[in-house]
Image: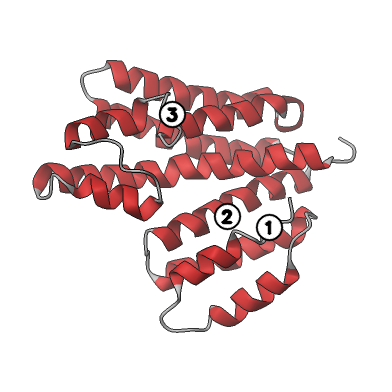
Amino acid sequence: MGIITVDKSDHLFWLGRYTERVYTTLKYYFQSADKMIDANPEYYGEFCRKIGIPNAYGTREKFLRAYPFDETDPNSIISSLNRAYDNAIVMRDYIGTETMAYIQLAIDDIHNAKNGSAALADLMLTLDHILAFWGCVNDMIDDEQIRNIIKLGKGLERLDLYLSLDLPDNDVRREYRRMKQFLAKSKLRYDESVINTVDNMMTDDPLNHPNLKKLLRNLINE
């Protein structure tokens, strides 16, 4: 396939980040929707605080409708998925049409859910197609560097979200170990001092989630 330019690397990296953002935030949306319906109608404010987006929704009903579907909201799930598709279409010759098609199917799922009568059930198909996309990345892309750049983006986004959502420290450590494998193989420039600092911090108990998140956001030299 030839040399992967900085511009192409950036598209692959953000393809990985946006697909992971859709996957993890949609799973959290399902969990939060249950809390809002069953116990705490105002929980959408906590949702916004944790993932670091403005709480511009006003009511539970508006949040439940707008956050997955509103294409004018830059923080919505569909907006992240559209950005993933934008990066995928630029890199179609590198990732393959079949791989890209699963992102289109995920977009179709959200549009169908918006217009259907069982939105939460229909949105589950989005998760299935994101998983199928990652399966295609593993199975259909021959170039190891391309695969590893996408997986690096995915891994960094997952770490960022896990730290934001205060998931268990062992989950954070596991994802950090995975991300480092892809970082080493991606051939992207990164700040080694960040890795050295984070390595030392990963031995802390408990982990300092806010500081780790700040450090990791400065890892890649873009």
Callout 2: SS = helix
Residue 173 in view (yes/no):
no
User: Residue 152 at x, y = what percent?
Assistant: 65, 53
> Residue 81: x and y, percent?
50, 31
Q: Between 42 and 115, which is closer to the camera in this rendering? A: 42
220 vs 133, left or right, is: right
Q: Is residue 149 left or right of residue 107?
A: right
- Real-space CA distance between mark 1 and mark 2, rounded to the nearest whole angstrom: 8 Å
Name the amino acid, label 1: Phe
Q: Amino acid at mark 2?
A: Gly
Residue sticking out furthest to the top: 115
Q: Quadrant of residue 185?
A: bottom right
Give the mark, 1 or 2, whose residue is nearer the N terminus.
2
Residue farthest along the left direction in this orientation = 39
Dot 3: few (<14), some (14–19), or many (≥20) neighbours within 10 Å?
Answer: many
How many angstroms separate mark 1 from mark 3 (CA)?
A: 27 Å
Q: Going from the N terminus, do you reach mark 1 or mark 3 first?
A: 3
Q: CA distance from mark 3 to mark 2?
A: 20 Å
The residue tagged 3 is 78
Can you identify the residue that label 1 sits on?
A: 182
According to the picture, the residue beneath numbered tag 2 turns out to be 155
Residue at image point 18% right, 37% down: 60
Out of 81 and 101, give the one closest to the viewer. Answer: 81
At label 1, counting other C-alpha atoms closer than 10 Å, the crowd grade (few under 14, some 14-19, many 20 or more) is: many
CB within 8 Å, label 1 to label 2: yes
Is 25 left, or right, of 217 in this rendering?
left
- Write down the quadrant of residue 216 in the picture: bottom right
The correct choice, above or below, for 73 with respect to 148 in the image is: above
- Please tell me which residue is depicted at 37% across the width and 64% down the height of the picture: 166
Q: Nearer the viewer, mark 3 or mark 2?
A: 3
